[in-house]
């Protein structure tokens, strides 16, 4: 199938160059097979799968740039696609920032696609769900197991031609007891890494521990954030912080070369680890260091932002095909303090061993399992507001003592990880699915964090 997508990319490229001699042309082909098994009330209620092939074209003609895409791939469909994109280019405004095409370059080495993930069946997904439900011990459960297999090809009129295959799987589920929810999530490129029993027990343990919560006043509290909560910080960093376009337009707090984070923070984008071989510009991906021991050392670039930056800047392989948005990290990895087991069993009523080690150092604070409904208030400081969910607990004397009702928070994420505010980093980093249903969304790999302060601005009573 890799040969098929490469052949199609080459065919479409030939059609466009024949119709518009001298144009800069890029063609991308994606053959995707996403599938989703959802469950609620502890029963599978939806199992869906699809297979599609899409072609995208971007052209730069006479100083003007346009793009178009289609899934109608017969002779007439391709002819129409080519005609549409050239007609759009003729009407587009002049594009002074066009950076030119990616030169021929090979992709780096990727991990081989796991055959079990590539060939996963509905019964495989149902088995993971069954194990999750059974392990919850009779609690009401809900969630999903999704898988994706993708062949991709890219070709341009400068001679770049690359293909790649990838596959991944993600699981997220909750267990509920008396209105209290516990959650477990995990993502991987290998189906065997997804143990529904381990995840179901984890969610159930958190639900039991979250029952009958009490309310305490909102304030600034020391916190331990579990990986599921830290993932929200990474998502915001990906979109708004290290995006070179946002930095150039002064919409980001990031300043390369400065010690903006605590020395315990080391962060990078590792798209190849997630099976992403090249970006929307056809640039091969690589690991991109962003923060090294607290010092900001890099940004994510596409070809356009790199050309605008000058000074020898180069694309980092993070283009998403949007001139207006810029380059986005696809798999941010926040390093844990030491290697660990990302699917370890929970230890005690609420936390796994790695998180318990951080809790042990807190005299009085709050353990947060998850954030949701977070919204950016100020991109320049990356101030966000949102809510806690799926478990919040009071920590006293280094132990989780009682469940709490949910809070609203307003917190500058940049400030949360600044020097002196990160008291400890968990030794295990967990890979988490970036979105419930979409296989095209990023992964986040995050450990738990112990932070000196988090600004809770409201409680259940207001």
Image: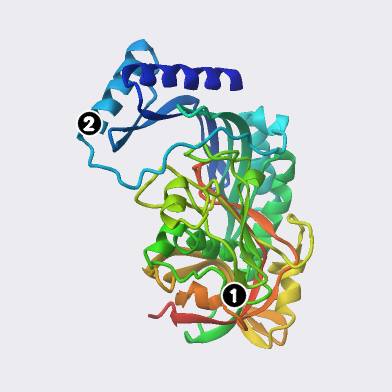
In the rendered image, the residue lying farthest to the top is 75
Q: Position of residue 393 (x, y in %)?
A: 60, 76
The circle drawn on residue 90 is 2
Dot 2 lies on which element?
A: helix
Residue drawn at x 47%, y 84% is: 218
Q: Which residue is mark 1?
A: 261
Q: Quadrant of residue 422?
A: bottom right
Work out whether 278 lies above or below 430.
above
Q: Is residue 315 left or right of residue 359?
A: left
In the figure, 86 relative to 132: above or below? Answer: above
The C terminus: image quadrant: bottom left
Locate residue 321, reporting x and y percent. Answer: 42, 42
Q: Quadrant of the N terminus?
A: top right
Give whichever of 186, 215 is nearer the camera. 186
In the image, taking residue 113 as reference, residue 386 lies left or right, namely left
Q: Describe the colour scheme in one phrase.
A: rainbow
């Amino acid at each position: 199938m890799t040969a098929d997508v490469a052949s199609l990319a080459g065919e479409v490229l030939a059609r466009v160059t024949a119709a518009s001699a001298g144009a800069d042309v890029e063609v991308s082909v994606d053959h995707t097979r996403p599938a989703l098994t959802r469950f609620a009330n502890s029963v599978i209620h939806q199992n869906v799968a699809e297979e599609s092939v899409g072609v995208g074209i971007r052209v730069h003609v006479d100083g003007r740039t346009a793009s178009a895409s289609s899934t109608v791939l017969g002779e007439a469909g391709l002819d129409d696609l080519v005609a549409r994109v050239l007609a759009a280019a003729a009407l587009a405004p002049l594009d002074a920032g066009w950076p030119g095409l990616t030169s021929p370059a090979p992709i780096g080495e990727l991990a081989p696609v796991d055959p079990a993930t590539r060939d996963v069946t509905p019964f495989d997904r149902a088995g993971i769900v069954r194990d999750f439900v059974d392990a919850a011990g009779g609690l009401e459960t809900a969630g999903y197991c999704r898988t994706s297999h993708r062949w991709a090809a890219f070709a341009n009129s400068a001679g770049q031609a690359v293909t790649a295959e990838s596959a991944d799987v993600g699981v997220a589920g909750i267990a509920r007891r008396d209105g209290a929810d516990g959650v477990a999530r995990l993502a991987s490129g290998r189906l065997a890494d997804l143990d529904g029993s381990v995840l179901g027990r984890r969610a159930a343990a958190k639900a039991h521990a979250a029952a009958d919560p009490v309310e305490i006043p909102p304030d600034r509290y020391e916190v331990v954030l579990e990986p599921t909560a830290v993932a929200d910080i990474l998502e915001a960093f990906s979109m708004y912080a290290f995006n070179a376009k946002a930095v150039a337009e002064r919409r980001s707090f990031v300043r390369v070369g400065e010690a903006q984070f605590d020395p315990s923070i080391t962060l990078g984008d590792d798209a190849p680890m997630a099976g992403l071989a090249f970006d929307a510009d056809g640039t091969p991906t690589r690991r991109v260091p962003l923060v090294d021991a607290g010092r900001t050392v890099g940004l994510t670039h596409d070809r356009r932002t790199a050309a605008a930056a000058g000074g020898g800047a180069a694309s980092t392989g993070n283009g998403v095909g949007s001139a207006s948005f810029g380059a986005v990290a696809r798999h941010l990895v926040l390093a844990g303090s030491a290697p660990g087991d990302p699917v370890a069993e929970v230890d005690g009523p609420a936390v796994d061993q790695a998180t318990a080690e951080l809790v042990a150092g807190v005299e009085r604070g709050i353990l947060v399992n998850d954030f949701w409904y977070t919204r950016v208030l100020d991109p320049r400081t990356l101030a966000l507001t949102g809510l806690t969910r799926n478990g919040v607990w009071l920590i006293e004397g280094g132990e989780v003592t009682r469940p709490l009702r949910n809070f609203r928070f307003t917190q500058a994420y940049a400030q949360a990880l600044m020097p002196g505010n990160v008291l400890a980093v968990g030794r295990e980093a967990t890979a988490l699915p970036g979105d419930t249903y979409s296989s095209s969304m990023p992964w986040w790999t995050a450990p738990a964090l112990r932070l000196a302060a988090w600004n809770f601005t409201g409680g259940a009573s207001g």
